[in-house]
Image (cartoon, rainbow, N blue to C red):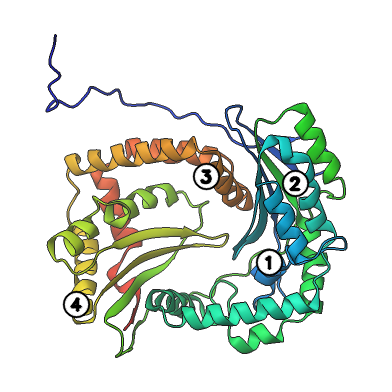
Amino acid sequence: MTTLDRTIPPAYKPMDKVTFAWPNAVAADMPLFVLQKNDLELIHVTVLTGASRHNEPHHGVAQMTGKMLLEGTTHKDTKQIADYIDYYGAHIHITHRPDYNSIELTTLPRYLGPMVELLAELLSASTFPEEQIAHLQKIKIQELKVENEQNHLLAYTHFKQMVLGPQHAYSYRLSEDEVMEITRTHLWDHYQQYWLPSCEIIVSGNITAQVLALVQGSFAFVKPAQATPPVPTLPIQPPKKVHIPKPDSLQSAICIGKVLFPQTHPDYAAMYVVTVLLGGYFGSRLMANIREEKGYTYHIEATLVPLQAATYFIITTEVMQQFSAQACQEIYHEIALLQNEEVSQAELDKLKNYMIGDLLTNLYDPFYVIDRFKEAHLHQLDQTIYHQLFDTIRNITPADIQRLAQQHLALDSFTEVCVG
């Protein structure tokens, strides 16, 4: 019997292409997309709408409009809706993003009929009862009070306001007074003008002809989506450094970043690789330096936040107050190293293996694909951006990374916020 030598890693063959399922448009009287996954024992239905912060009549309306869809229809009150969902063991979730809103249903195929009927009822027959608006306002105010005690949320909010100004749709900070000023008229008008006219339906799972007919019949009221107004030009502000003291806090939250280009920019995929190398996975440079070597933090992360008009490049962490200045200094040090020295081929190969493995794992998850489809669809992009990302990961060189860091991560271009 041959003994397995576990000190020798198994052989592997590099992949030269990636294939994965992607939602396809279906010829119908409504905007309908289908992601076929025959092995998925669930049906996932997403209603995507262009109703967003960009077209709300008052701060907070876009988010609350979505939440109110579960608070009452012409046939059911909020308790009856919750009981109905529980009875069928389904899940309905409202997602709010600055650029879009969505309402998502996950259910077993055998219960698709009653659950799709409910989803269509929520979308077409919501009544926005006054007592539930008041209830959600109280909940939102409590959420704001909790958020105001969390340094990392305050740092992120201040960062957005510093780079875009305090009133932009991407950056405004909702106040308690603004929450209480939201009226049923605000919500109803936003629902009628933007939710319903811009709806698109995405269905994933084992989609048979019967499933498709059921969805089309239930959402027959949905018409071809109307274009939503374009996103206003971003009023990018000069970089600043701000410290917001909170003497009673043990930790300081740090947010360092800038506004970059949108996903349509030719350097986006390559900058994503640079970001992961810097602080996007456990083996990243920021983790190795500031967590493993210096011990300043438990977690530090660099990430790209893609929005319709631009992208945030952000580095976030929380450290003991006495180490906040040193942590910031080490962050800039690591960025400077990317600009001044080429990454070794060994480190780059490790990064590539991680990123390709992570990409392939995620792209075989239909829920992940739906989320990526929503973002790409809003940018008028398709799945080719992920083929391009795969090719970029495989082909990027140490010289490319150094050039990108020099071009897009100039040290004097960053806004820095420290809360605590």
Of discs 1 and 4, which sits in the foreground? 1
Q: CA distance from mark 4 to mark 3?
A: 37 Å
Asked if labels 1 and 2 touch by Cβ distance under 8 angstroms, the answer is no
Relative horizontal placement of residue 57, taking residue 345 as reference (left or right): right
Q: Which residue is mark 3?
A: 368
Q: Is residue 376 above or below residue 177?
A: above
Quadrant of the image for the N terminus? top left
Image quarter for residue 111? Answer: top right
User: Three-letter amino acid code at disc 3?
Assistant: Tyr
Q: Which residue is mark 4?
A: 323
**Residue found at x 49% / y 28%:** 19
User: Three-letter amino acid code at disc 1?
Assistant: Lys
**Counting other residues with Cα less than 10 Å from the Cα at mark 3, is it few (<14), some (14-19), or many (20 or more)?**
few
Q: Which mark is residue 67?
A: 1
Relative horizontal placement of residue 127, taking residue 274 as reference (left or right): right
Of discs 4 and 2, which sits in the foreground? 2
**Counting other residues with Cα less than 10 Å from the Cα at mark 2, is it few (<14), some (14-19), or many (20 or more)?**
many
User: Three-letter amino acid code at disc 2?
Assistant: Met
User: Three-letter amino acid code at disc 4?
Assistant: Phe
Q: Nearer the viewer, residue 320 or 286?
A: 320
| Residue 318 image offset from top left, x and y in percent | 29, 72
Image quarter for residue 228? Answer: bottom right
**Residue found at x 76% / y 81%:** 183
| Residue 142 image offset from top left, x and y in percent | 56, 81
